[in-house]
Amino acid sequence: MDVKIFLSSTSLDLGSARERILKLLSVIPAELVHMETFGSDETRPADYSLEQLRECNLFVGVYAERYGTVDPKSLKSITELEYREALRMLNAGRLKGLLVYMLDTSATWKVEYVDRDVANVEALTSLKKEIKQSHTVTFFSDIESLSLCVLKDILRKIGIGTRVAFRPREILASVPLARRGPLGMEHYTERDAASFRGRESEIASLCDLVQTHPLALLIGDSGIGKTSLI
């Protein structure tokens, strides 16, 4: 099944989080649907967003301290409308997964990113309460941990796992090196892959590192083979 992921959140406060999540998700075989790619259309914003959501089979909802742009027709924020449509799709068996993430109440957050409108605060509080009662929620305190959690959950939902997602590309046809003699500092490509073996343990170690650490360093002397290993 083709995977289409819809990312839902407010943008003013979670813009950098959205950027990081989308960057990490770009490594997996899936189509990403999000407001940054909507462009212009004659349809009302809420209606257009819901139309895009209905074409997806995975929903990622991220919620912090802003209710978002309110649709004048329904008097609900577009973010809430997206969640409710995703919930309807899930109950109808049209979603593979509905994943939700909330800012931890103990996390440090900029004051300008906190909604001050009384009606919005009440609506957001009610929405969060409903979501927490209906789903298993991941609470985040920083953008990096949030984006890694989203990536891991998506990989789990689509059933490929992080080790498979980050493994080296398979070579469809092994072509032996045309050159003779010992290997040196020549330029190698995927056509030469059959001539390089014995790095399975190093590959496994790197896969484990990128699953559990936001930053993994590969350090070694010049010419030792760092680039070919990556």
Image (tube, rainbow, N blue to C red):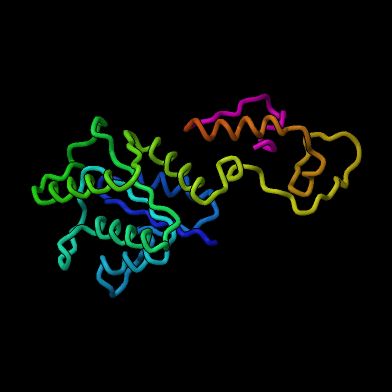
In the image, 228: left or right of 50? right
Relative to 91, residue 221 above or below: above
* Residue drawn at x 33%, y 54% as measured from the top left: 8
Q: Viewed as shown, does residue 151 lie left or right of 169?
A: left
In the depicted view, which residue is nearer to us: 191 or 162?
A: 162
Q: Which residue is at the front of the view, 190 or 182?
A: 190
Quadrant in which residue 200 is drawn = top right
Give the x, y percent position of residue 184: 81, 34
Quarter of the image for residue 228 reads top right
Quadrant (top left, top right, bottom left, bottom right) of the C terminus: top right
Q: Horizontally, is 119 left or right of 23 in the view?
A: left
Q: Position of residue 21 (x, y in %)?
A: 41, 46
Residue located at (55% from left, 41% from top): 162
Magenta highlight: main SS: loop
Q: Give the number of marks.
A: 0
Q: Position of residue 49 (x, y in %)?
A: 31, 64
| Relative image position of residue 166 (x, y in whole percent) | 59, 42
Quadrant location of the N terminus in the rendered image: bottom right
Tell whether position 218 is magenta: yes
State yes or no: residue 138 in magenta. no
Furthest residue toward bottom: 42
Residue lying farthest right? 180
Magenta-colored span: 215-230
- Please indicate whether residue 199 sits to the left or right of residue 145 in the image: right
> Toward which corner of the image does residue 91 lie, by quadrant?
bottom left
Task: Tell me what residue is drawn at x 68 percent, y 24 percent.
Answer: 221
Q: Nearer the viewer, residue 154 or 224?
A: 154
What residue is at 26 percent from the left and 66 percent from the top? 45
